[in-house]
Image (cartoon, helix red, strand yellow):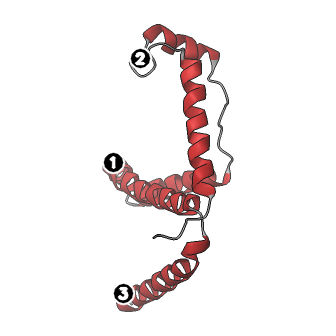
């Protein structure tokens, strides 16, 4: 059974890789970036499952709680991928006030709201640049 499962995983992973490889030239870099972010999120879920699941088993003594942690974290990940992300144009007023009082070496001569707007514009430019199809090398 283990060998059949490993063979199946290998076949599907190879087929997926070859399909992506054929269409890679026509895809923007942003697609690759999104695939990488989702993959990293899945790896983080596995690591947090190991840590949190072992703690749940240790405190409760029930082995099923290990998988309960995985189900919870995986569900939260899938919900976060389906829901739209919140990207406000300006920071919250109370947050801006606190950070302006504290200060930061990153934005010495400007308010936090100005720093927020500047970094938001830089991120929008980066995303727009990544949405263009990759140019042929050479």
Q: Examine the rendered structure and indicate whether residue 59 appears above or below residue 14.
A: above
**Whole-number angstrom distance, CA of label 3 to CA of label 2:** 55 Å
Q: Residue at x 51, y 86 (%)?
A: 15
Left or right, 105 with reference to 87: left
For marks 2 and 1 on the same chain, the one whose residue lies earlier in the sequence: 1
Up the image or down, 4 lies above or below 16; here it is below
To which residue does mark 3 refer? 2
* Mark toward the start of the polypeptide (3 vs 2): 3
* Label 3 neighbour load within 10 Å: few <14, some 14-19, many 20+: few
**Residue 54 percent across, percent down from the top left:** 33, 53
Q: Is residue 96 above or below residue 137?
A: above
Which dot marks residue 104? 2
Q: Nearer the viewer, residue 11 or 50?
A: 11
Q: Position of residue 16 (x, y in %)?
A: 52, 80
Q: Residue at left 46%, top 59%?
A: 42
How packed mark 2 is, by other alpha carbons closer than 10 Å (few <14, some 14-19, many 20 or more), is few
- Residue 80 appears in view: no
Mark 1 highlights which residue? 55
**Judging from the image, what secondary structure is the residue with disc 2 in?**
loop
The structure residue drawn at horizontal position 52% and vertical position 63%, both measured from the top left corner, is: 32
Q: Nearer the viewer, residue 63 or 19?
A: 19
């Amino acid at each position: 059974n283990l060998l059949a499962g490993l063979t199946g995983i290998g076949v599907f992973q190879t087929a997926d890789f070859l399909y992506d490889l054929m269409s890679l030239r026509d895809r923007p870099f942003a697609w690759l970036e999104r695939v990488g972010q989702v993959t990293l999120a899945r790896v983080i879920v596995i690591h947090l499952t190991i840590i949190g699941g072992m703690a749940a088993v240790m405190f409760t003594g029930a082995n099923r709680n290990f998988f309960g942690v995985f189900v919870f974290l995986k569900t939260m990940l899938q919900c976060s991928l389906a829901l739209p992300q919140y990207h406000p144009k300006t920071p919250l007023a109370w947050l801006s006030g606190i950070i302006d009082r504290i200060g930061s070496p990153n934005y010495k001569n400007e308010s936090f709201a100005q720093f927020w707007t500047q970094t938001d514009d830089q991120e929008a430019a980066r995303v727009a640049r990544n949405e263009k199809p990759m140019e042929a090398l050479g």
